[in-house]
Every structure is written in structure tokens, then in C-alpha cells.
Amino acid sequence: MQKHQVLIIGGGLAGLRAAVECAMLGVDTAVLSLLYPVRSHSGAAQGGINAALANMPECQDDSPAKHAYDTIKGADFLADQDSAEILTTEGVARIYELEHWGVPFSRTPEGKIAQRPFGGAGYPRTCYAADKTGLYILHTLNEQAVKHRIKVYNEWAALALASDGARSHGIVALNLQTGDIGAFAADAVIFATGGAGRIYKRTSNAMQSTGFALAIAYRAGIPLKDMEFVQFHPTTIIGTNILMTEGARGEGGYLINKDGERFMQRYAPKAMELAPRDIVSRSIQTEINEGRGLPDGGGSVYLDLRHLGREKILERLPGIRDICLSFLGIDPIEKPIPIQPGQHFIMGGIDTDNDGATILPGVFAAGECACVSVHGANRLGGNSLLECVVMGRRAGAAAARFVQGQASAINQAVLNDTLKQTIEQVDALLKSEGKERLVTLRNQMQETMTDKVGIFREEKPMAEALAILRELRARYRHIGVDARHRKFNLDLLHTIELGGMLDIAEATAASALARKESRGAHARLDFTTRDDTNWLKHTLAYFTPDGARLDYKPVTITRWPPEERKY
Amino acid sequence: MSQTVTLRIYRRDPELDAAPRYQNYQIELTPGLTVLMALYHILENVDKTLAFRSSCRSAVCGSCGMHINGMNRLACETQLAPLGNEVVIEPLPHLPVLKDLVVDMTPFWEKYERVRPYLIALKAPPEKERWQSPEERKKIDEFIDCILCACCHTSCSTAWWDKEYLGPAALAKLYRFVADSRDEGGIERLKIAAREDGVFRCHTIFNCTEECPKKIPITFGIQEIKKRVIWGKLMGKL
């Protein structure tokens, strides 16, 4: 049995930032990660990280308050305004700190951190390092974790939270390398496991972005907030749905339909390609639905960078050029890129306060798996990496305060019970004669989510989706695995994960079906306008064996009254 | 007409198998099919006991380095079609095999940690960012792209036989800081490089540079460190 004061689940940006904070505060800290931390999906973030540094000539009067306003407007006023101001205010110091730790930001001619325009932002505010910003920040934070000698449990899958309902006592996890299931006692646990894109068929997310940790928290009684708000990134390449950064449009790239028209002029005449992501994705999908997509593109339009010229593409967008060459056989210097919207981010997640604390004492969450909410109904590009470092630090600091303020109160019996139950469940799965299998159920879940809980939504398809997901959850009770070996049993891991994915897909569909308005990324064809009278509130989904039980709580409005959202 | 390819995959569970074996799988070639997606197809539809690592499937996480038709590459960005009718897939060479294509990366990370892989700043930082000119920043352009996939390290014939040698990945990381205008590790970094297990074990075979999926000129970086070490010795600083 391992024991730490703070155990962080996930080694991406939020998890590592939290870990470094705890270590700097002198707390015994460990990271438990499904992947080696540098493999985390934070590393796939391309375009940049927002903060009002006012480094560019055209943004001298930018400020954290203006950044907060843009964030809140982009969020279609569902963001908590106090949280958004924390994000944008503390964000400035977090960026300087990253630079001090060695992040190789791209530079202005005089040597400051360079900033580029991004969607929904009034100024060029997105600090970047070519188009590999997430990769460089992830590696830099991993370097800091090495420097602080933080213990990392590599390739462990967290399976369950040990809770007595009053507080948590630790985590039970599966060691992929050996097949052993072990218990980790911890006074505080921080979930920082990223997104859940793989509940959808078309996603920019990693294979490992299953969102399983959301299900761990959810099953332990912690509500999932605002799960209906799912971001579809406008530009993912056809076939694999690998991301083409918003920075491509920030640097001046065009979106073009089959007639060669820059169609964004009909949807967002001022912001054009740099409208917020929900609006651009809907515009692209409308072009496709109305027959102006590429004739043989499988539902796609073009992202055209050719006019930017070779030099600018090689300097600012080298990573996406390499992706196009490897995965499409297309050089964007010479040809336009066929793209389509794809699931990219969940605005919702484990319900937390501004310190990452959940309703269960000792459990915290930060980054994409958490919902503070700083992104409301739609996240602005460049704000997710920022959330990771700002809220990762805050959650780390809060967890450190939590464990330093009181004597360790770990109840070994609760932890042992959870360990025993989890081992029994996994053994039962390995011995199951059940006829159902991973691939069939997972594919049906993913297709249902993409087809019926996607960019455009409506009562009937969503109700069908909910019924299908409930049926899939019932069928999952009869699932079996075929592989019985211990080491690196991917069949077992993926089958366990599917159970959690079905829970959160069901919570997403239930939350979406209930919200009878259009707001941000939740766009309903049967309720086309925002309804502040009835729906200016956060959804809370509570786990029950039969499916999500929904409740609501108010949005914090401080100084920006909701207004119509025009770009 | 559909074309099939034979994947000849290294299989071994060291707890059960005394020796590795190769198992053949037939797979239908579809447009854009990568080695990684072919492995997923096998895992999910043919043989659920197959083990391999992957995550981002877009050549940025570094999980899926493996030895494909005699060369270390990332499975996710390697198109199957140009590889011929029979494709041999093996784990990265000269690391202990945990199962099938999954190797024990522990020796690799140990070397990474030995080079003090973090920015060393002796002076307190300014309130805002340190300034760095675009020209200074350009000097680390290629070396910051390292994704620690271990394709270089496991292609290096010196690292194969000399288990203490820091190897190309760790030395590329060392060079990334040596070349960074903000780093003040200075002579301390060169001392690490100058040790017996350091840069002078590199015999400029260029395997690392040739097999790096990110096209980082690793051999160049190692020689740049050698130059600085030699200069340090001549000046009596090392």
C-alpha cells in the first residue's frame, strides 16, 4: 500500500502544475498517470495560451478584465464571472512563470513573448510557441516535476475512489505493466485527467481521452456540471479528425466552400473566420448540410493557407504542415486542407469551486475534467491551457492547505473495502461468460453521440440517444472480455473504461435533452434562442444506477449583465 | 480490387514465453491506413491479447515508437501502403520487453533525468518574462521538438551495448538547454556531458538523426556539446 498526502490523478498540464505547487509547498505528493506524463494529451494542444500581456503593438490597452469579458461573452454568459476573472487575472503571472521555467515561447522582434489573434478575442492575446504550445508547456512542466523529484506512478489506471460519503481516503488503481490492482492512501486526491472526447466518433482527442475519471467521481456522488456543453472544433482533418489549430485562422487562413466562397461572411461578417468555435463549427456544418461542402470530401470544406506563403507557414505552422503531409498526403503550402468539425473539448466536468474543490471533502479536480465554470457554454481557443495552469495551481494549493490544516484521517477499512470490491469486479469481468463485447457497444455509443448529440440538436434524436445509451448501459452488465493475460491487457482496460464512458455519455445526453434553449455549443433546432429567464443556470447531473438525476444551480454574475452575442 | 498486407508481429509475454515468436496477421489495405490503426484493427477484431502503446495518434505524444521494417518509427504516422506486402513490426530494440510491442522504458527515463533536464537559472527572474531575441530562440528551434519517443536512443548502436551511455535523447535534451540563451547551467552541464558516459561515446554514426521522427539533427547537437567540452578543457574549466 502506497501513501501520500496528495495524490494527483493525471500527468498533463493541470496535474503537473498542481503537483509542482504541492511540492513547492512541502507536501508529500505523487502523480498517478495512465500514461507517462509527457504522453498526455495536453501535448497535442497547438495554437497557444491566452493572457493579457499586451505585448503586441495592437494590444497595448488589453487587460485581464477585457480578457474576462471576451471569455464570458464567448461562454454565452454561462461562465461564472468571478471564476473567469480569476482565470484571466492570475493567468498573466502563470504565463511569466512558465517562461521562467523554460517554455520556449515564440518571440516578438524585441524579444517579448509573441501573441497571435484567436477566435472571439478582442486583441491578439494568445501567447504561442509556433504551433506546438501544448507540447512545449507539457515538457517544461514535466521537467519541473523531475526537478522537484515528484514521485510518478506511470501507467496506472485509476479505477475507483475510496469514499465513506463524508470524505475520500484514496484511490484504487490498476497497474497496466503488471496487471496488479493496488490501493493508494491519500488525504487529498486531485483529478486532472483531461477530456472525454472518445465518447464521440469524430474527435480530435487522444485514444486515451475516455473521461473515465469523470465516472469515478460521478459514481462517488460528486455531480457532473454542464455536461451538455460539448465543443466541436471547426477544423479537424477528414478521416482521422486530427486537429488543425485555430492559429491557422489566427495567422490569416480562410475557410472556403466548394464554390470557392469565404462563407463566414454570411455568418459572422465582422469576425469572419475568427468568430468563436461554436459559431464557426455551426457555419461549416450548415454549408455541408446545404450542399456546399466538398463533393468527395465526406462532409468537409477547405481550410486554405496558401496565401500565407511558404515562409509564414514554415515559421508559424510547421506542426500542422507535418500532420497534413503524414496523414493526408497534402502540403498546405500548395493545396487547401479538407476539414470538418470534430468533438474537441468538454466545457462540463466534475463540479468544482474556484479552488478545484468538489462537494466531497478531500477531492479536487482541475483542467478539462473539471467544470469551475470558466468556459460556460463555449470555450474560447487558448483558454484551456490557461485553465490547466491557473486552476491546476489553485487546486494544488487548496489540496495542500487541506492536508496541512488537519491530521491525516485516512480510514484504512474504507480503502480496503474499495480495493476488495474493485478486485472482485475486475475478476468477475475476467471470468464473465457475458456475450456482449467492447467494440459493438462502444461503436454504437460513439455513433449515437456524434449523430444525435452533436453540433445541431433536437428533442427527438436526443430522446432516441438517451434511450439507446440506457439500453447500452443495460447490455454492458452482460459484457465479457476475451483476453485474460495480466500485463498490458488492453481488452480489459478498454472494457472497464467503456463502463465509465457510457455513464458520462448518458449524463451528457440527459443534460442536453433537458436544456430547452440554445446557448453556446448547445444549439437546438427546436429551441433556437437563448432563454435567460429559465436557463441561465448550471446543470448538475447526479449518478443513479438508472441514469442521471438532474438539478440546477445559479450562475455567478458580477459585472457583465447577459447581452446578445454578436460577432 | 482490395489488397491485403501481412503484418508479421513480434509477440512475447516474458512471464509465459521463453522466447519471442512472430505471428502473422492479414489485413486489408484501405486508403490512409496507418500501422497504428492496423494494430487497433487486430486488437479489436482479431487478437485481443496484442499489446502496444499509443495515445495521441497524431505524432506528438511519443507513445508508439516501434521497429517497423527495420527502422524505428512512430506507428501512428507511418502509412502502411508504401511498406510492401509483408511488414515486420517489432518493439524498440535493446530495451527489455514487457509484452509484445511494449518495452520497459525505465533505462530511457533514467538517462533523461541524469542530464538535469530543466532550465537552470541562477539569477532571480524579472517580474515579467525574460527577453529572448527571435535569433536566440531559433537556436533551440529543432531540439525543443523532441517528444521523447526513444526512437533515437534505441537506434544508437553505442547505446545498445554501453548501458551507461547517456545516449542521443538525453544528450539532445542537454543540448536544448546548453543552446538556450536563458539557461545558466553553463559549466555544470558540460561536466555532465564530459563524463565517461557522455558525449565522447558518440561515434557519429548518425543513426539517431536518421531515425528521429521529428528530424532533429541530434548528431549535430552532440558535436556542438563536444566542441564546448573540448574548449572548456583547453581553457582549464573542466
Image (cartoon, coloured by chain):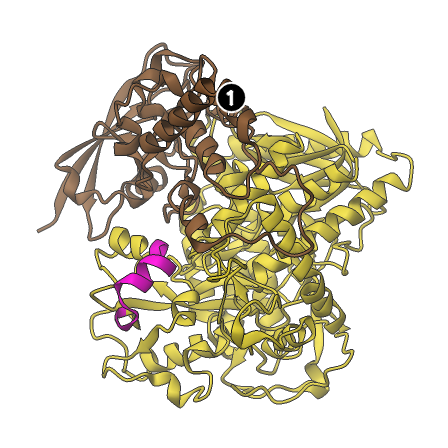
Chain colours: A yellow, B brown
Q: Is residue A155 left or right of residue B45?
A: right
Residue A540 appears in which quarter of the rendering?
bottom right
Give the percent coordinates (x, y) of residue A202.
40, 61
Above or below for A6 versus A337: above
Q: Quadrant of the N terminus of chain A?
A: top right
**Residue nearest the viewer, comparing B148 with B133:** B133
For the image shown, how many numbered marks are present on the structure? 1
Provide the chain ID for the residue under circle 1.
Answer: B
On the picture, is A10 further left or further right than B106?
right
Residue B217 picture quarter? top left
Q: Is residue A209 visible?
A: no
Q: Residue furthest left?
A: B1
Q: Give x and y (percent) for residue A303.
A: 31, 71
Which residue corresponds to mark 1? Answer: B192
**Residue lying at 16% horizontally and 38% vertically, measured from the top left:** B83
Q: Main secondary structure of the magenta part?
A: helix
Report x, y in % for residue A296. 20, 70
Is residue A314 shown in magenta?
yes
Task: Point out the residue furthest to the right here.
Answer: A406
Q: Which residues are magenta?
A: A306-320
Tell me if residue B111 is in the magenta stretch: no
Instruction: Decide which of A280, A224 is in the foreground and name it.
Output: A280
Q: Quadrant of residue A374?
A: bottom right
- Where does residue A11 sit, x and y in percent of width and height? 59, 41
Q: As displayed, is residue A161 above or below residue B235?
A: below
| Residue A18 drawn above or below residue B172 | below
* Element assignment for label 1: helix
The residue shown at (30%, 70%) is A308
Q: Amino acid at mark 1?
A: Ile
Q: Residues within 10 Å of mark 1 (few under 14, many from 20)?
A: some
